[in-house]
Amino acid sequence: MNKQLILAKRPIGLPDKSTWTIEENAIPEINEGEILVKQHYISLDPAMRGWLNDSRSYIEPVAIGEVMRAASIGEVIESKNHPKYKVGDFVSGWGGVQQYSSSDGSGYYAVDPNLAPLPTYIGTLGMPGMTAYFGILQVGKIKEGETVVVSGAAGAVGSLVGQIAKIKGCKVVGIAGGPDKCKYLKDDLGFDATIDYKNEDLKIALKQTCPEGVDVYFDNVGGEILDTVLTRIRMNARIVICGAISQYNNTTPVKGPGNYLSLLVNRGTMQGMVVFDYASQYKEAMIEMSKWLKEGKLKSREDVHEGIENFYDTFLRLFSGEKLGKLVLKVKE
């Protein structure tokens, strides 16, 4: 049987357990030219919350009654003359939160478990890694010597953004919640400075850590943190809008930046980025990031939990902050 997580209703605010149901259905039978994948790991990402809303966005919402959308990685256990994939290949794609997925191969790509652990391919070498790479390099347009501030800095995307900026010769300040996360950013990942937004005055801390101002701000949280950073930007600053996790479960209107006129005064730009726009360039990014991993310039960390039946409790960690690095769900045998 195939254990699946099915969307049962659209949540208002923070989803509760009744948002999804767990069903056991027959393992899908594949047609000519298709593959059957036994899933090993499933990616949990803040974007999943947005996919639950029936509203206009960069991607269609998950439909009621559908398997919950998620990136995944697994092994091909059956192939009916597929032109690219054979039994024993490992592939990553949009398999959803379930034990088995079938596909014609569209949107999937092969991975080599001998080159990197499988969870790395849905973390540093997957969507979070691609988001960080293109977000900071192509949207943020960082230059050596600039000051870069990252919010959600201990998360899957933020931790990579900061490391890439360090590789490129920038000064990096990470905003995170709690002393343990801040210690991780400085001691393990090499950030120049950190700000614990839960225990420090953000405005004062920004003045201390960025005395000459902020050249690039990579925003994963939105809300008051974005608004405060805008007061510290330098001339021609770039603001990368990647996410707004502080706003995703609002039951009231999203709080926008009141200090947006700072963009006018400083001739700054604020640009949203969606990783899918860079799909044609993923391969080159993966090659460069794999090289950085081998050289020890880039560190990858996955927070792995087990069992589809534990999806909800694991999902909540995205919003409670009870994680470091990439949140991953391991599929039980």
Image (cartoon, helix red, strand yellow):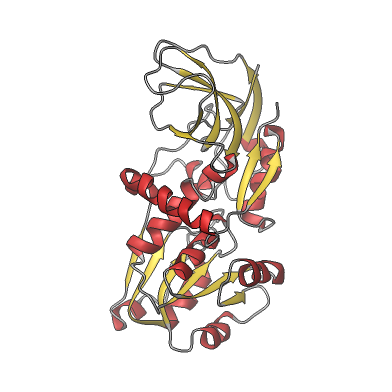
Left or right position of 32 against 122: left
Q: Quadrant of residue 6?
A: top right
The quadrant of the image that shows the C terminus is top right
Q: Residue at x 62, y 52 (%)?
A: 318
Give the percent coordinates (x, y) of residue 59: 39, 41
Taking 284 as reference, is 95 above or below it? above
Residue 3 seen in the figure: yes
Q: Residue at x 31, y 43 (%)?
A: 280
The quadrant of the image that shows the N terminus is top right
Taking 73 as reference, is 333 above or below it? above
Left or right position of 28 against 332: left
Give the percent coordinates (x, y) of residue 267: 28, 79
Taking 58 as reference, is 63 above or below it? above
Work out whether residue 321 or residue 113 is closer to the camera in this orientation and state it. Answer: 113
Work out whether residue 122 or residue 244 is closer to the camera in this orientation and state it. Answer: 122
Q: Residue at x 57, y 80 (%)?
A: 202
How many numbered dots are placed on residues in this image? 0
Give the percent coordinates (x, y) of residue 72: 54, 35
